Image: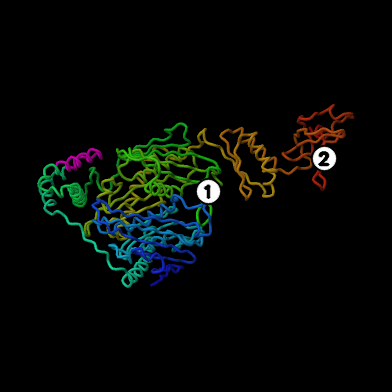
């Protein structure tokens, strides 16, 4: 039986429907807004397994038929997920994952399809809400629902769920949360202050509450019966014995400050526990690793809350030692090495032309992208072996966070008409490699001579919370991320925030805690920016000698055809003669690129001559193209020829044209007339007279 409800959010009405589609799924909901429809399904495997993690899979896919398009490329069907599909899958996963029982290990799969797109409505928000509703009515153990909204800021006013074509916003903020607290934020901003960010998050949560309330009421009336779930039993005797016998050993792990040393010490302790207790607890001794991990977290959190001391000995606001090098790759257009503690990012900038821009085939239309940040996280960065090759979801997500954070400082295209590719190679990692990427990226852009607005840096904040007591940690380690309650990444300049991402592992945090975290992050960010400025304070004045030089000129639209020529003959000729790369936009913008200055100048001159109008009275250097009995035809500008009559060759009488000039000669001539048909009359005699 089909049932539905709706909720008013901002200017939109969001409709939820269940009972029409995919009735064999545990939960299935279609969400519509305007002419866009997103479908979400949730299914739980009944197979009981002994995994030590929760196998949740979220897959978001955009169907091209949704907007009446056929996929591009040779294979005319949807292929591997695009970056946007991957990022949206992560947006759905992150706020729902903490709301399943801690020891729940049944496989759960959430699949979301975009079935209809009006090419205006942004789908990621609809997808999060659809996934939440499908889980809420499925009977799967889930402590939801959650709701999600997008917030923009135009002319100082906060707006809800802006459309694709809404422009001029200083904020792009996605917020998800429960009825009681925010659990995830993600987005970018044009240098907004901490107070403006808090205002936007509170505004978002006020509207999230409406969505959660509607989904909760609907689930109470229409949810399927709860699927039986028995919490996994614990060996309380083993837990008690490990606590009583090895608590001091866990406390002594504090002496190991180095990441690898500590990991080895933990492994040695686990092996010791297993060896000494295996005979007594043969059936549950494999759980010793998780018991030690929980005990380690308890000790670490207690020391942070009681003594204000962290795993590596730092105070709560302490930043790890920073080391910076720039220009370390001689042939790269820009490079830097940013090291903070045991996290290290190699940032490399490559400058390209318009032809290097990424073409994106998306359901709302084809676009191009002229700034790309690619983040690579090889296994050796954490001292491990592993598969290499394709990029994982985590790499896509971290790269996009850094890309958003840096985008604000980039120059406008008319000021710097380059395609920019920035690559972050993570060579070491012990917490916050995405924020190290922001720092290395900013430094390498400075080194490349890109005229950015100012430097940008990033920092990851953590949280330890027990009851009403909490501690906020600056520049967290991997261990503090693993055992803490929050991972809050903030990037920005000296005056404002440009990028942010927050994931909460508990039920949520209050605006007061978030405000404290943002201001503590600002303090850390300013410290890091100071270290960066000590090395390089402003962009280099000159580009790398190996980078292409680009010149942009604007021509009248009716001149585009003349530059291209019949069948592209003219533009091919210029490219072959000069070696420069030439791109022409429909609006008349011509971009010329070459790594050789002479080549660039020659191409600019050639195009300027093509678009130049012939002027009466002006002297040109023309090339003799054809000789006749009555004169010669000279090309004075590309594609523009004039007649030099035999009577205008010289002051004295000329019997034969070839007595004065021959084919291939270059001769100075003056334009003495242009008739209504555009025919040009030339005079060598008048040019000589003027000279």
In this image, 596 relative to 95: left or right?
A: right
Q: Is residue 263 magenta?
A: yes
- The picture places residue 237, in percent across and down from the top left corner, at 11, 53
Image quadrant where residue 270 sits: top left
**In the rendered image, the vertical position of residue 658 relative to residue 487, given as above or below:** above
Q: Is residue 551 magenta?
A: no
Image quadrant where residue 353 sits: top right
**In the rendered image, the vertical position of residue 609 relative to residue 115, given as above or below:** above
Q: Residue at x 34, y 69 (%)?
A: 213
In this image, 35 relative to 96: left or right?
A: right
Which is more toward the observer, 662 or 531? 662
- The picture places residue 215, in percent across and down from the top left corner, at 35, 68
Secondary structure found at label 2: strand
The residue that mark 2 highlights is: 681
In which quadrant will I find the N terminus?
bottom left
**In the rendered image, the vertical position of residue 324 relative to residue 10, given as above or below:** above
Which badge, 1 or 2, is on the more N-terminal residue? 1
Residue 496 visible to an observer of this rendering: no
The region drawn magenta spans 253-272
**Which SS does the magenta portion mostly show?**
helix
- The picture places residue 196, in percent across and down from the top left corner, at 40, 58
In which quadrant will I find the C terminus?
top right
- The picture places residue 264, in percent across and down from the top left corner, at 21, 39
Q: Residue at x 21, y 40 (%)?
A: 256
Residue 112 visible to an observer of this rendering: yes
The residue that mark 1 highlights is: 73
Real-space Cα separation, disc 1 to disc 2, in angstroms: 52 Å
Q: Nearer the viewer, mark 1 or mark 2?
A: 1
């Amino acid at each position: 039986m089909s049932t539905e409800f709706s909720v008013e959010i901002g200017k939109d009405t969001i409709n939820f429907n269940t009972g029409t589609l995919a009735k064999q799924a545990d939960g299935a909901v279609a969400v519509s807004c305007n002419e866009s429809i997103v479908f979400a399904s949730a299914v739980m495997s009944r197979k009981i397994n002994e995994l030590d993690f929760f196998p949740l899979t979220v897959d978001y896919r955009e169907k091209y038929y949704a907007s009446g398009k056929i996929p591009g490329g040779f294979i005319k069907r949807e292929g591997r997920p695009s970056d946007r599909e991957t990022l949206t899958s992560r947006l759905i996963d992150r706020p729902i994952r903490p709301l399943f029982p801690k020891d729940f290990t049944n496989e759960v799969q959430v699949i979301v399809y975009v079935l209809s797109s009006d090419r205006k409505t942004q789908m990621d928000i609809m997808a999060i809400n659809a996934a939440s509703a499908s889980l809420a009515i499925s009977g799967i153990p889930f402590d939801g629902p959650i709701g999600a909204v997008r917030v923009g800021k135009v002319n100082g006013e906060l707006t809800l769920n802006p459309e694709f074509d809404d422009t001029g916003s200083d904020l792009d903020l996605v917020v998800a949360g429960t009825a009681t607290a925010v659990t995830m934020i993600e987005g970018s901003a044009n240098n907004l202050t901490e107070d403006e960010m808090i205002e936007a998050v509170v505004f978002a949560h006020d509207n999230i509450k409406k969505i959660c309330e509607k989904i909760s009421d609907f689930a109470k009336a229409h949810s399927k019966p709860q699927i039986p779930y028995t919490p996994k039993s614990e060996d309380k005797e083993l837990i008690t014995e490990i606590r009583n016998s090895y608590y001091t050993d866990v406390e002594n792990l504090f002496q190991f400050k180095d990441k690898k040393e500590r990991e080895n010490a933990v492994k040695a302790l686990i092996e010791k526990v297993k060896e000494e207790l295996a005979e007594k607890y043969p059936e549950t001794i494999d759980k010793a690793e998780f018991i030690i991990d929980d005990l380690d977290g308890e000790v670490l959190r207690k020391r942070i809350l009681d003594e204000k001391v962290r795993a590596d000995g730092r105070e709560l606001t302490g930043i790890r030692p920073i080391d910076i090098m720039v220009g370390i790759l001689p042939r790269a257009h820009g490079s830097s090495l940013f090291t903070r503690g045991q996290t290290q990012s190699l940032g490399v900038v490559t400058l390209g032309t318009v032809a290097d821009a990424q073409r994106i085939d998306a359901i709302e239309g084809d676009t191009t992208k002229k700034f790309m940040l690619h983040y690579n996280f090889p296994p050796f960065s954490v001292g491990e072996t592993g598969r290499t090759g394709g990029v994982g979801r985590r790499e896509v997500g971290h790269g996009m966070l850094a890309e958003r954070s840096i985008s604000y400082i980039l120059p406008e295209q008319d000021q710097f008409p380059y395609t920019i590719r920035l690559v972050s190679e993570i060579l070491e990692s012990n917490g916050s490699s995405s924020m190290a990427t922001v720092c290395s990226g900013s430094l390498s852009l400075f080194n490349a001579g890109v005229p950015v607005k100012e430097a940008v840096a990033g920092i990851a904040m953590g949280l330890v919370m027990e009851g009403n007591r909490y501690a906020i940690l600056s520049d967290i380690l991997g261990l503090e991320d693993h055992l803490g309650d929050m991972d809050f990444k903030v990037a920005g300049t000296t005056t404002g925030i440009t990028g942010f991402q927050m994931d909460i592992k508990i039920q949520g945090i209050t605006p007061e805690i978030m405000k404290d975290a943002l201001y503590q992050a600002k303090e850390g960010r300013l410290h890091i920016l100071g270290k960066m400025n000590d090395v390089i304070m402003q962009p280099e004045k000159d580009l790398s000698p190996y980078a292409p030089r680009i010149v942009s000129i604007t021509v009248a639209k009716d001149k585009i055809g003349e530059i291209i020529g019949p069948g592209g003959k003219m533009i091919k000729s210029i490219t072959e003669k000069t070696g420069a790369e030439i791109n022409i936009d429909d609006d008349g913008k011509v971009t010329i690129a070459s790594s050789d200055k002479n080549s660039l100048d020659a191409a600019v001159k050639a195009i300027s001559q093509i678009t130049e109008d012939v002027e009466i009275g002006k002297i040109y250097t023309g090339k003799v193209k054809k000789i006749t009995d009555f004169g010669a035809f000279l090309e004075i500008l590309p594609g523009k020829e004039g007649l030099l009559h035999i009577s205008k060759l010289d002051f004295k009488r000329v019997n034969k044209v070839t007595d004065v000039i021959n084919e291939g000669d270059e001769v100075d001539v003056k334009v003495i007339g242009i008739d209504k048909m555009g025919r040009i009359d030339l005079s060598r005699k008048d040019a000589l007279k003027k000279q």
